[in-house]
Amino acid sequence: MSGRVHGIGVGPGDPELLTLKALRLLREAAVVAYPATEDGESLAREIVAPHLPGGQREIPIPIPIQGGPFPDEGVYDRAAEQVLAAVAEGAAVVVLCEGDPFFYGSFLYLYARLADRCEVAVVPGVSSLMACAAVLGAPLAARNDALSVLPATLDETVLRRRIEAADAVALIKVGRHLAKVRGVLEDLGLAEGALYIERATMTTERVLPLDQAPAPAPYFSMVLVHRRGEAWR
Amino acid sequence: MSGRVHGIGVGPGDPELLTLKALRLLREAAVVAYPATEDGESLAREIVAPHLPGGQREIPIPIPIQGGPFPDEGVYDRAAEQVLAAVAEGAAVVVLCEGDPFFYGSFLYLYARLADRCEVAVVPGVSSLMACAAVLGAPLAARNDALSVLPATLDETVLRRRIEAADAVALIKVGRHLAKVRGVLEDLGLAEGALYIERATMTTERVLPLDQAPAPAPYFSMVLVHRRGEAWR
């Protein structure tokens, strides 16, 4: 008997943005793994909490602070061993992933360690990229638009050059880089049309004018810009 | 009494990739609008067909052939009037959108005509971007990657320049532009690592080596490229 692993996207925050497939797999799972802080808090687990059947075994994966340095790879080595042990016992394992598993998530470091050693399937989820646009009422891109997703962690010069080259831009991982992002957008004359949102679809969601956005911003914040002002023009 | 409109993302094809929120709104809707061919066929409606409660009024929106020229704007003017008439009668209207409503969808032309005239909320869906990556087992982007979404409809020179500048690339709307895309990727030495997929998560889904991909490709096809080979390196 051998188990299997599903990496499931649990969406951006609203528990109702879980897919039917993720819900089914969650209910069938004997083991549920998820990223957590070193204190054991887990946004991914919170999102699915209303749907957890109870009785499942849990594997929290302690990821160092978000927005901080990239974690010690040993965290993923140890988590992979725990998951593989559960699979060897025949368990159906789900790994919860905030948003979508393959869009800048920590899941892919675990995936890299599992994919050659057991059956791993990925269930796509609603990404924060689409959730932010939906809440802001701002279409991301249309027709022949080139859409660039840019981590705000990039160097200022690189960021400026990439924003200049794009039609539509989503700046992710804004956090402590808010002031830099705002400066670049002001220099390029794009600050006025830029949209700031934090924690889209969570109960703590906030939309603010860019010049009133907090610096540092929360980790789960995004700035959307369209160079024509609106995607449908 | 006044109705309201929800634009709901129905995901990339698998009816199980609908969100719980989209399902609830669909079941509550008195009127369901959706893009359709001039013959009345509708992928968006097919995706939700297993979930339709029956008895709802339907508004097909006849969009000219996908991949063809951009439609006569009158199509959206007329659809907007039909939706507004239903809202004025107090109906809960949902507009079905393939994938996500704000990611290169036709919904945004309708949204542009409705947003100032009635309450329109958008429910994000699982996008083909994330679905293709999930099926291919290929993470889109990680860490400081700049991810570029590029319509294959772009001019060859523009396409080449944009691909050269990105870390990770998703080429969408491949269709009749497959040969051009393949040529550019070959010139840049990226063809070997490129992944081709068509109709991700649909029953007709196919993954092929890029050099065996059909030219023209189907409208719902995508090519993913990562310049480092893999997002987690």
Image: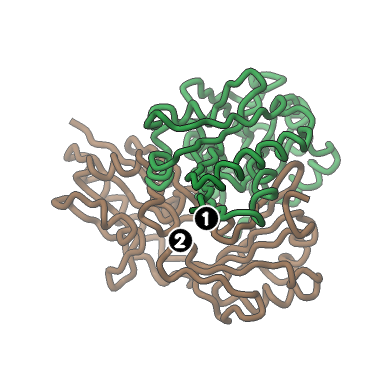
Chain colours: A green, B brown
**Residue closer to the observer: B112 or A197:** A197
Q: Circle 2 marks a residue in which chain?
A: B
User: Horizontal and vertical percent for residue B89?
Assistant: 17, 40
For the residues bearing labels 1 and 2, Cβ distance under 8 angstroms: yes
Please indicate, yes or no, whether residue A138 appears anywhere in the rendered image.
no
**Residue closer to the observer: A141 or A186:** A141
- Report helix, strand or loop for mark 1: helix
User: Horizontal and vertical percent for residue A92?
Assistant: 47, 45
Q: Residue at x 23, y 43 (%)?
A: B27
Q: Residue at x 27, y 45 (%)?
A: B26
Counting other residues with Cα less than 10 Å from the Cα at mark 1, is it few (<14), some (14-19), or many (20 or more)? Answer: many
Q: Earlier in the sequence, mark 1 or mark 2?
A: 1
Residue A64, image quadrant: top right
Residue beneath label 1, please? B131
User: Horizontal and vertical percent for residue B231?
Assistant: 72, 52
| A116 w.r.t. B118: above or below | below
**Residue closer to the observer: A158 or B223:** B223
> Is B187 displayed left or right of B76 in the figure?
right
Please indicate, yes or no, whether residue B165 appears anywhere in the rendered image.
yes
> Is A187 displayed left or right of B220 in the figure?
right
| B194 w.r.t. B82: above or below | below
The three-letter code of the residue at mark 2 reads Thr
Q: Measure how far apart labels 1 and 2 are at the Cα level.
A: 7 Å
Counting other residues with Cα less than 10 Å from the Cα at mark 2, is it few (<14), some (14-19), or many (20 or more)? Answer: many
- Counting labels gives 2
Q: Circle 1 marks a residue in which chain?
A: B
Residue B162, image quadrant: bottom right
Residue beneath label 2, please? B201
- Report helix, strand or loop for mark 2: loop
> Is B202 displayed left or right of A61 in the figure?
left
**Residue closer to the observer: B58 or B10:** B10
